[in-house]
Image (cartoon, rainbow, N blue to C red):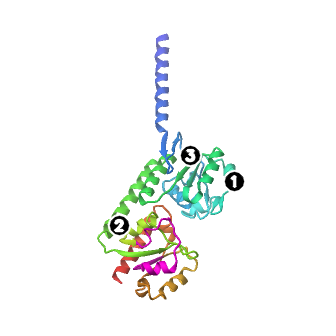
Amino acid sequence: MNRHITILAQSLIGAWIGLATWSAALAVVVIDDRGQAIEFANPPQRIISLAPNITELLFAVGAGSQVKAVSEYSDYPADASALPKIANALGVNLERILDLQPDLVIAWLSGNGQRVIDRLEHLGIRVFVTEPRRFADVERLLSVFGQITGHPREGSSQARRFRKQVASLRDQYAWKSSMSVFYQLSQRPLMTINRDHIISELLTLCGGDNVFADYRLLAPTVNIEDVMKRDADVILISSTVPNVSRIRSQWLMMQDLKAAKTERVFIVDADLINRQTPRLVQGLEQVCQLIDQARSG
């Protein structure tokens, strides 16, 4: 009898140890974009997103139901629009965030700033920091977000799909002749992008050369004289520029510019190229087609 009890006890202990080992194996350790290691023993169930692209990435990997609040302009997919808004360009509502009791806040370093991140962590909130600058970063974040939210298969699947779509378009346009491009990010002040901006990589993939690639700032302010001096073959205008159709007409009237003479001035859907999400593929297709149109025009 005692022998049987001993065997049963050993079996139970063995099973418990096996369960403990299995549970420990589930823990996920990831490195965020500031280089900090963050361990997740369990997938977070109360996530707050502080940027529209982060919101979209979370929904893309199947973690939409775990997102409890988002930043302003988190409008894709449609379900994200109904979530409470706790951040905008002016800052974050720390009191509201505390009320929501998140087990994870995902922040955007450039957009939210180190001060906000420090304040959140000082309040005892776990923060994962992102700073995507390249197409490869989108692929990586899809995989990482899938891992930490408990959707590793969907995250990996979305990452592979994104990589293949980008590679296909790269191969399609790699042999095309180069076209110089000026991308207008805003009007007042007149701003553009340098080589480190993800939109510049998008232009390169389409066979476009960013005429302000050499500028030091990520989104530098320029003037009309600068634009005229660099005289791009193509002008692309972000759809977020106020009165964008009127701005396009103004460029077309500047007949000293090559792009104006040949009517190679186009408006681009900003949501598809300003956000570091899988929809960059759609933006890439659109921009590549516009630059290709300019080649044949």
Amino acid beneath label 1:
Arg
Q: Which mark is residue 169?
A: 2
Which segment did they paint magenta?
Answer: 210-236
**10 Å neighbourhood of mark 1: few (<14), some, or many (≥20)?**
some
Percent from the top left, x then y, of residue 30?
48, 45
Nearer the camera: disc 3 or disc 1: 1
Residue sticking out furthest to the top? 2
Q: Is residue 282 visible?
A: no
Q: Quadrant of residue 109?
A: bottom right
Q: Do residues under tags 3 and 1 come within 8 Å of each other at their CB atoms?
A: no
Which residue is tagged 1?
Answer: 96
Q: Is residue 114 above or below residue 40?
A: below
Q: Do residues under tags 2 and 3 come within 8 Å of each other at their CB atoms?
A: no
Nearer the camera: disc 2 or disc 3: 2
Q: Which mark is residue 44?
A: 3
Q: Is residue 220 magenta?
A: yes
Amino acid beneath label 3:
Pro
* Label 2, label 3: how far apart the Cα atoms are: 35 Å
Q: Label 2's element?
A: helix
Q: Label 3's element?
A: loop
Amino acid beneath label 2:
Leu
* Label 1, label 2: how far apart the Cα atoms are: 43 Å
Q: Which residue is depicted at the point 44% across and 71% down?
A: 212
